[in-house]
Image (cartoon, helix red, strand yellow):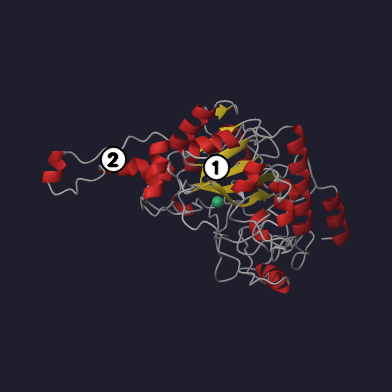
């Protein structure tokens, strides 16, 4: 592929509307690379192959056309509920039931324009690294081709050094819903990043959850459950006689665990999510399931079609990070970008701990509530977070950059997005 042409395409890159970016026929389907960019490493990481993917990454390929027709006909959750930002209680109710909820108009025109520009620039940086051989782009270490994460591609593992991401942590549309879900204004920001797929990401990303469940009910978690209205019942006398502890009833314990996620992420849609452009999929109710997500070869078709088609640009999905989810094929000519902000529950231990990925200078520009939310990840004055500002698809390059900038540069395995 002519390098000059690739760079010219990148200059015009936008994360909404038609683009020439993507659809690289020279990047084999299901190919992953290791941290140095070598294809097909022994550890695929997050690049779990999709056994049902089309054989070629070509817009008019017969397999691709067949899949496109199938998606046109069937893709998307039937009757997907989309809330208005003012429907705070309804949004929280759906969130607790399904493990996610879509809310429209989270971003006004200005915030949407800023977020589009910021995420386009970050993507331009990632894609400007030349691919191996004749490939248009370098694939991100441990991911499937044409799929990237703003978080993991950043050498600091987060995007909170960017004003655009930092300015999204406390919005008049998101804060009331987060407060309702968390039962307290004392939740906090863990990080910010998000994921995207280029046109021509023909493979399904495997279903996964971002965080596991400890099943531990601390005093603080119990208090949160009470605050959001969980009725605390103890085992009745009959159960106690049968040998139960006489403490919280099993049904109550389950409800507490189900209704108090440790981590909630908001992914913001930069374009309308359509049947064709790789809408994220969410499996309703799976935040409360006690089994690991099914591997790609066992996935029923309905789980592949359980996507958020219909969520408009400027909308967002609040996700319980325990819920099963995954990315889907982008067979369009539009980049599907979902930058995000990740929040932790107030009951999570470790106040003051965590990687300090937001520069003090950025923190100073925030609203008082946003400053409160960012208390655990704010760096000290004049300390630049190691790796912040370096975007690279390869793990080894990111680690080296972070080390050069004074940090250990550890790249945690958590994939985000
Ligand atoms: Fe994920």
**x%, y% of residue 92?**
49, 33
**x%, y% of residue 362?**
73, 52
Q: In which quarter of the image is residue 35?
A: bottom right
Q: In this view, does 416 lie to the left or right of 285?
A: right
**x%, y% of residue 160?**
68, 53
Q: Is residue 233 left or right of residue 28?
A: left
Residue at the spot 59% in from the left edge and 42% down from the top edge: 266
Residue at the spot 39% in from the left edge and 43% down from the top edge: 223
Sequence order check: which comes first, mark 1 or mark 2?
A: 2
**Helix, strand or loop at disc 1?**
strand
Q: In this view, does 263 lie to the left or right of 364?
A: left
Compared to residue 155, the image places residue 161 above or below, namely: above
Q: How crowded is mark 2: few (under 14 residues within 10 Å), some or many (20 or more)?
A: few
**Helix, strand or loop at disc 2?**
helix
Q: Tell me if I can see residue 238 in this picture.
A: yes
> Which-is-in-front pick, marks 1 and 2?
2
148 or 74, nearer to the observer: 148
Q: In this view, does 387 lie to the left or right of 180?
A: right
**x%, y% of residue 282?**
51, 42
* Label at residue 211: none
Q: Tell me if I can see residue 24 in this picture.
A: no
Compared to residue 320, the image places residue 91 above or below, namely: above
Tell me the distance, in whole angstroms, between the alpha carbons under discs 1 and 2: 29 Å
Mark 1 — residue? 281
Q: Which residue lies furthest to the left in this view?
A: 241
Q: Quadrant of residue 380?
A: bottom right
Q: In which quarter of the image is residue 151?
A: bottom right
Mark 2 — residue? 251
């Amino acid at each position: 592929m002519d390098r000059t042409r690739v760079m010219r395409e990148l200059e015009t890159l936008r994360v909404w509307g038609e683009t020439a970016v993507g659809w690289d026929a020279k990047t084999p389907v299901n190919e992953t690379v290791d941290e140095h960019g070598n294809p097909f490493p022994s550890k695929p990481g997050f690049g779990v192959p999709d056994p049902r993917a089309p054989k070629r990454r070509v817009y008019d390929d017969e397999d691709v056309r067949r899949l496109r027709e199938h998606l046109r006909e069937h893709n998307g959750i039937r009757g997907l509920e989309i809330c208005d930002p003012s429907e705070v209680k309804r949004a929280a109710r759906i969130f607790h039931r399904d493990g996610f909820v879509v809310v429209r108009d989270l971003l006004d025109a200005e915030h949407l324009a800023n977020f589009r520009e910021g995420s386009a620039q970050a993507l331009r940086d990632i894609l400007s690294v030349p691919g191996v051989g004749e490939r248009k782009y370098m694939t991100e270490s441990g991911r499937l081709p044409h799929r990237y994460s703003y978080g993991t591609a950043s050498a600091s593992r987060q995007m909170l050094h960017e004003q655009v991401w930092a300015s999204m942590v406390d919005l008049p549309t998101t804060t009331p819903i987060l407060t309702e879900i968390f039962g307290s204004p004392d939740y906090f920001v863990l990080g910010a990043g998000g994921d995207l797929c280029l046109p021509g990401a023909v493979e399904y990303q495997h279903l996964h959850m971002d965080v596991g469940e400890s099943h531990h009910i601390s005093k603080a978690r119990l208090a949160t459950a009470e605050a959001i209205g969980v009725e605390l019942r103890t085992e009745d006398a009959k159960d106690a006689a049968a040998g139960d502890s006489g403490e919280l009833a099993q049904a109550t314990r389950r409800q507490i665990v189900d209704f108090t996620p440790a981590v909630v992420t908001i992914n913001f849609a930069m374009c309308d999510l359509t049947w064709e452009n790789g809408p994220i999929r969410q499996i309703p109710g799976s935040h409360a399931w006690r089994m690991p997500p099914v591997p790609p070869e066992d996935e029923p078709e309905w789980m592949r079609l359980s996507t958020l088609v219909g969520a408009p640009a400027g909308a967002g999905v609040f996700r319980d990070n325990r819920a099963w989810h995954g990315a889907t094929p982008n067979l369009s000519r539009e980049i599907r970008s979902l930058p995000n902000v990740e929040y932790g529950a107030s009951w999570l231990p470790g106040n003051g701990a965590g990687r300090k990925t937001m520069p003090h200078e950025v923190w100073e520009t925030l609203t008082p509530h946003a400053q409160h939310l960012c208390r655990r990840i704010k760096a000290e004055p004049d300390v630049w977070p190691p790796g912040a500002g370096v975007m690279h698809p390869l793990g080894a390059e990111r680690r080296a950059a972070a080390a050069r900038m004074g940090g250990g540069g550890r790249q945690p395995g958590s994939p985000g997005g």
